[in-house]
Image (cartoon, rainbow, N blue to C red):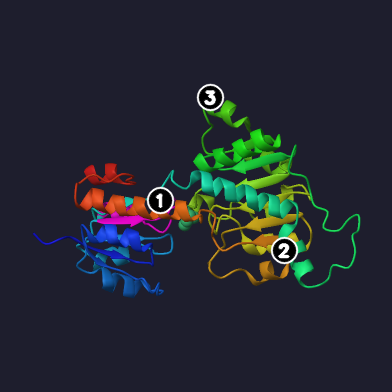
Amino acid sequence: MSKPSVLVARAVFPEVLARLAEHFEVSDNQADATWSADELSARLAGRQGVFTTASERIDAALLARCPDLKIAANMAVGYNNFDLDAMSARGVLATNAPDVLTETTADFGFALLMATARRIAESEHYLRAGQWTKWSYDLFAGSDVHGATLGILGMGRIGQGIAKRGAHGFGMNVIYHNRSRLTPELEAECKARYVSKDELLQQADHLVLVLPYSPASHHAIGAAELAQMKPTATLINIARGGIVDDAALAAALKAKRIAAAGLDVFEGEPSVHPELLRVPNVVLTPHIASASVPTRLAMANLAADNLIGYLVHGKPLTPLNAAALNA
Ligand code: DGY
């Protein structure tokens, strides 16, 4: 019997490709070319599986051109690149890569918070530019992290990881807002107190965004929300572009309406709002929160395991729409 055929839409670890090749006819993109939606659907025609990252969109238009597709396995925990309803309607399974990146992403959220609060990037640029001539009492004086109020919007596994780092490592007062409240046991473990979104915005010294993107969370932080924050506050976004209104944030940073921001994700990335590139009080990183070598390998292996699990054994590990497919 011939092997099922899968497309790996982006460059990936060679050892993961080798694992896939044990089970499938594999077409890869080790040159990491950027494919249009048309190119992606053309390359996917006749194949049963696709290995995606958060950059490849799987929607009704693509599915209509790929009637043989049975599964799209995302090498990302976020899956706003998938139109789940369209996939379910076509009988295509969607899987993501949860859990394996939780601690690494929480580490990065905390690193970005510290870099932003303590102005590490801005001061490094100053030093490299040869501008440092003497010590002075207020040179790059920022805000404290220890003992401050840490606000978390979105309290899934990554949010909880950040809460624990803040509460247990830095003695922070942790508050959070989420669609649903944590159990008392989890709140105690995270030492986190549930508050309304308004209270979160008004009380946080450092506000970290970790909520999934959906039409409901589009511009969850815009001009009105930024206006509620303390002028000394920092805002950290490691969730998804589009959750923050980047134009409104750039204006707030320029006007010092809030003190600083740390951003790993952007509206329309890899483009970055030109005003964000101009203001000094923002730390910008290129969507790397989960990017430690072991974690990226674990994410890729989980996406591969989902392809193998479903197409070879009929049992995916981390399905998103299995119930809809079985309905
Ligand atoms: C994720 O896993 O969702 C990260 O943002 C990488 O895309």
**Could you tell which of marks 1 and 2 lies nearer the N-terminus?**
2
Instruction: Give the distance between the C-alpha atoms of the residues marked 3 and 2, in whole angstroms.
Output: 40 Å
Crowdedness of circle 3 by 10 Å Cα count: few (<14), some, many (20+)? few
Q: Position of residue 35 (x, y in %)?
A: 38, 74
- What secondary structure is marked by label 3? helix
Amino acid type at mark 1: Ala
- Indicate whether residue 86 is drawn in magenta: yes
Q: Does residue 211 appear anywhere in the picture?
A: no
Marking on residue 185: 3
Q: Does residue 7 appear anywhere in the picture?
A: yes
Q: Nearer the viewer, residue 19 or 200?
A: 19
Q: Which residues are magenta?
A: 71-89
**Could you tell which of marks 1 and 3 lies nearer the N-terminus?**
3
Marking on residue 298: 1
- What secondary structure is marked by label 2? helix
Q: Residue at x 23, y 56 (%)?
A: 70
Closest to the camera, between mark 1 and mark 3, is 1
Q: Residue at x 22, y 43 (%)?
A: 326
Q: Position of residue 137 (x, y in %)?
A: 91, 54
Residue identifier under label 2: 251
